[in-house]
Image (tube, coloured by chain):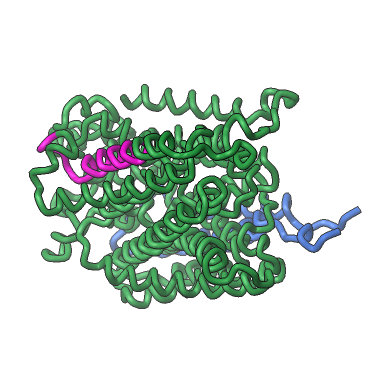
Chain colours: A green, B blue
Amino acid sequence: MTLGSVDLAIIAVYFLYVLGIGYYLKRFAKSGEDFFLAGREMTAWIAGLSFLAANLGSLELMGWAGNAYRYGILATHWYWVGAIPAMLFLGIVMMPFYYISKTHSVPGYLQLRYGEPARALGAVSFGFMTVLMSGINMYAMAKVMQVILGWNMDLSIWVSSLTVVIYVALGGLRSAIFNEVLQFMLIWLGALLIPILGLIEAGGWSGMVARITMRLHADYTHLWAPMATFDNPMGIHWTGIVLGLGWVISFGYWNTDFLVVQRVLAAKDLRSAKLAPIIGSAFKMAVPFIVILPGLLGLALLPADLHLTTAKIADATGGHSYDEVLPLMMVRYFGPGLLGLGITALIAGFMSGMAGNVSAFATVWTYDIYRAFMRKTAPDEHYVSMGRWCTVLGVLVSIGAAYLVRYFGSIMDYVQALFSFFIAPLFGTILLGMLWKRCTKQGGFWGLLAGTASSIALFLWVKFDPSAISIVALSHKALDQAENMYRALWSWLICVGVTVVVSYLTKPTPEKELEGLVYGLTAVPSEGHLPLYKRTIFWAAVVAVVFLVLQWIFW
Amino acid sequence: MSEKKHFLSIWLFIGSLLLVYGLLILGSGIYVLSHPPQHPLVLAKLNAPIWWGALLIVLGVTYILIFRPRREK
């Protein structure tokens, strides 16, 4: 398939806009707070949309559309139970501590609560995970562009990456956030037509379900019913989804991954910071409409001989991989112009995710590694300059990671493994740090280290002895995703257990040092004086009710 | 007043981009309608580029009007 001149014009205009925004905002990125925290002046809407867009990398779009084709509607759990409760928890419970402590990053909070060793561990593992994630996103996008459009992979990787470098290095976090909001709009407007046209072609939801059932003779369209046993397309039991994904991985990602938390820290005041994740959660609930539904429609409508498969098999046979279902659906419905918009949506998704990774990496490197351990005192301009260079460095390392990732078969499974290595234990450490004042510095550090080490050990155990899956994931029928969920759960439990034991064995931290950091010792401003419709808890309750209704509808 | 308060709204950028995209997509939709391809796409009869392009134009103009820079009183 080739793009016409109008499609290329649409893509070119997009690149001009994102670069233009970066150039325009450069003049406002003078101080460290401007560059790394966007001046802390974002409205709740901007912070909320950017918070969500930073998560909408190319993996979120193409990878999860592919997973919907592969696993059916079970993939929606990553958007609903695997996101919504955690996002609401961030807005209502955790955000006040992050915001009031005035930290510039999540490792920064670790330093305030647990001291330098915990910050170093958190910063290094975050930096490692971030550039790898960025590389994975880059690879996923370039691969699909190569297969669908015939674009050279190296060219795709370098052109889009250098564009991100330029606009983030110029305008810092503000430029990343502004572009993320623009990219968020483009993703929706570029992808929304696929489910609309797909449902028309399939004869509505019931028509789509009938076609899938006729083709596969299995339940691909119910959220919870197939998970009473491991005999479902994902090979996962509901306990793995609820405890592993819904609790540990999801709460870990949305509450402690600095990539997303950084966007909310840029909010102009505490109320905006609390409201931003709730606004993000409302839109997150709708994302399956443009990601999961196209995957299901692909399952129902794409020709049977176009059998999609894993990237490894697709590479070997010359066929199409699961990740290509979204572009294939675009090609099915989109002619000149619309196709350009659709491809721009995919590129925008990739760039928003990458800008999120790179801007978070630059902040953590500059503040939590460079300033903390290499050069403690320097003028503010020096750190801004370091942040700009780190943006370039982060992208170059990500490009290296993208070439490394070429040799891994299943991209998303690898991402989930990474989450369970770092994010799951980090969530245990931060949660205890915020809610339990008896938790000590030594407890936090050793708990985090034990959780991370145990997660990697469990991964290696199953890698070298596949029969260990029946212990790690509770069943020999468990597949990769189930293993990731349970591994995350075990590493979180080990982290919490070690933290509690070590805390009780060590001297408590004086309460004076914990003010503004821990529940019970932090004065969180009340919203009681506001009318009901202006309170964050009210909107969180609205989102929670819609979330529950959706579970019931698709049960 | 600080310099920071003189940002152009991001919604203005978005509005102008949607307007440009709407014009390009609507234009190509009209062209395809007047020069039908030999192998039409699935659901081509719905003329999606025309109404989607029109929608983008409406959205773009709305954003531009609401978020255009105004003189401070």
Q: Is residue A64 above or below residue A204?
A: below
The rendered magenta stretch, by its main secondary structure, is classed as helix
Q: Nearer the viewer, residue B50 or A73?
A: A73
Left or right of A511 on screen, residue A30 = right
Q: Which residues are magenta?
A: A475-496
Q: Nearer the viewer, residue A57 or B46?
A: A57
Left or right of A471 on screen, residue A344 = right
Question: Picture quarter containing residue A299?
Answer: top left
> In the rendered picture of this protein, how many numbered marks are placed on residues?
0
Residue drawn at x 45%, y 62% as measured from the top left: A354
Residue drawn at x 46%, y 55% as measured from the top left: A117
Residue drawn at x 60%, y 51% as measured from the top left: A103
Q: Is residue A288 above or below residue A11?
A: above
Q: Is residue A296 visible?
A: no
Image coords of residue A227 (percent x, y): 22, 28
Left or right of A506 on screen, residue A199 = left
Q: Residue A154 colored magenta?
A: no
Q: Is residue A238 visible?
A: yes
Q: Residue A482 colored magenta?
A: yes
Image coords of residue A534 (percent x, y): 68, 29
Left or right of A261 on screen, residue A150 = left
Question: Picture quarter containing residue A336?
Answer: bottom left
Image coords of residue A369 (percent x, y): 50, 64
Question: Picture quarter containing residue A205?
Answer: top left
Q: Nearer the viewer, residue A208 or A270?
A: A270
Location of the C terminus of chain A (image quadrant): top left
Image coords of residue A335 (percent x, y): 39, 60
Location of the N terminus of chain A (image quadrant): bottom left
